[in-house]
Amino acid sequence: MLSYESMTERQRQLYDRVNNTRNLNLSRCQSQIGDAEAQAIAEALKVNSTVTTVVLWYNQIGDAGAQAFAEALKVNTTMERLYLGGNLIGDAGAQAIAEALKVNTTLPMLYLSDNQIQDAGAQAIAEALKVNTTVTVLGLDRNLIADAGAHAMAEALKVKKTWTELDLSGNCIGKVGVQALEEICKTNCDPAVDFRCQINPLAFGYLPRCASAEELQTVFHLLSSGPDLQDQSASLPVLPAEIAERIMDEAHYWQGVKYTKRDWLRDCTNEHFKVTLPQGIDGPSIRVKAIRVLLDRWEDSKAAASCVFDLIVQDEQGVVRSELSVTPNCVDSTVELGTLLPASHPIIRQMRGGWQVRAQQDKFTDSVRSSWLYVGYI
């Protein structure tokens, strides 16, 4: 439990604000709500007896923040809508929220869209919903849920009779999971279940894995400290930090990506999609490691023409700093991937918090199921 006395000034400001509000909206917060801030907000929710809506779309809340909200849900009796979409919540955070749903009897609407929840998190939530009679609207779209998670949700649909809306679109549910959902929808038509636009399950394997700070530091230390070689009298040369980082970039060291921000277009609407980088997570600034465009085509469109994405990089003042283009290459029967790295695009090294990447396909095509823009950074 986080006491008021042990909070930072920023945490106390948020605590006081939440403690005296009925509707809280800190979506796309300029100063970015992370786990530390989320913990302060959660503490205030434990004692706020009037709040009904909490909106925290598109911040930097991870599992620790989700766990704090889970504890708040166990005691708060007034919250009706909780929006935690567009954050960094994974299975551990989802599992904590699932435990809270087993005892919470007042929250009807929960949105966990556009996070990093996989099958384990979805299965935990599904089990909780078998005993929870309050939640009627659940958003789990644009996560990483596959067949096992979809099957668990289908089983929950058989038991739970109070659904009105379940959104599982934009995950990576395969044919087995889709079939399970289709079967339950044939016999239970009351809830509106959306499982359209599933991404090829192989697609997410081509995205950079988010590394821990320890993993990143280990590799960087090997390059910059000159460790002794095993069974050799010699040692590696000591490299300056700038050179070590450059080597990691040019070696396509994806484990250098600690966080990702993403945006997507469903059904290939001819619009821009964009990613705005946060002002900082663990420090005053961030470093961008890569920009990736991921494209998933419909299965019957193998002979479709290539798509070119035009990218515009703007700084925090909205000034265009660079215009780039990328043509995704085929890496699977329906998946195409394009990558921009600092080694070939130096502007990436200049990008900082507040900068924005905008992307648009050069031409509209109905062969594309969905497109994703990822920016990986530390």
Image (cartoon, grey):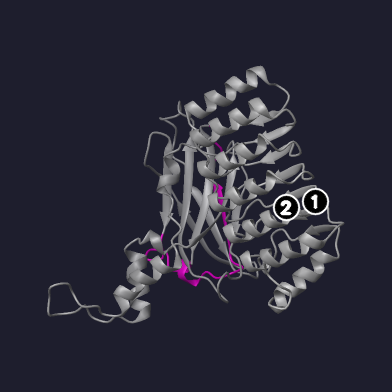
Residue drawn 45% across the image and 38% down it: 201
Which residue is identified by label 2?
73
Which mark is nearer the camera, 2 or 1?
2
Residue drawn 17% across the image and 72% down it: 230
Looking at the image, is 309 positioned above or below residue 288?
above
Camera sees residue 362: no
Q: Earlier in the sequence, mark 2 or mark 1?
A: 2
Which residue is identified by label 1?
79
Image quadrant occupied by the N terminus: bottom right
Residue 174, position as x, y percentages in the image: 48, 31
Relative to 256, 146 lies left or right:
right
Relative to 133, 153 lies left or right:
left
The amino acid type found where label 2 is placed reads Leu
- The residue lying furthest to the top in this view is 187
Secondary structure beneath label 1: loop
Residue count near mark 1 (Cα–Cα under 10 Å), binned few <14, some 14–19, many ≥20: many
Image quadrant where residue 159 sits:
top right
Residue drawn 61% across the image and 51% down it: 96
Q: Which mark is residue 44?
A: none
The amino acid type found where label 1 is placed reads Met
Residue 340, position as x, y percentages in the image: 43, 58
Residue 366, position as x, y percentages in the image: 55, 32
Marks 2/1 in contact by CB < 8 Å: the verdict is: yes
Residue drawn 80% across the image and 51% down it: 79
Asked if residue 349 lies in the magenta stretch, the reply is yes
Residue 377, position as x, y percentages in the image: 49, 64
Please state which of residues 96 and 241 is positioned toward the viewer in this rendering: 96
Looking at the image, is 231 positioned above or below residue 267?
below
Q: Which residues are magenta?
A: 341-366
Distance of mark 2 from mark 1, alpha carbons? 8 Å
Looking at the image, is 44 positioned above or below residue 179?
below
Secondary structure beneath label 2: helix
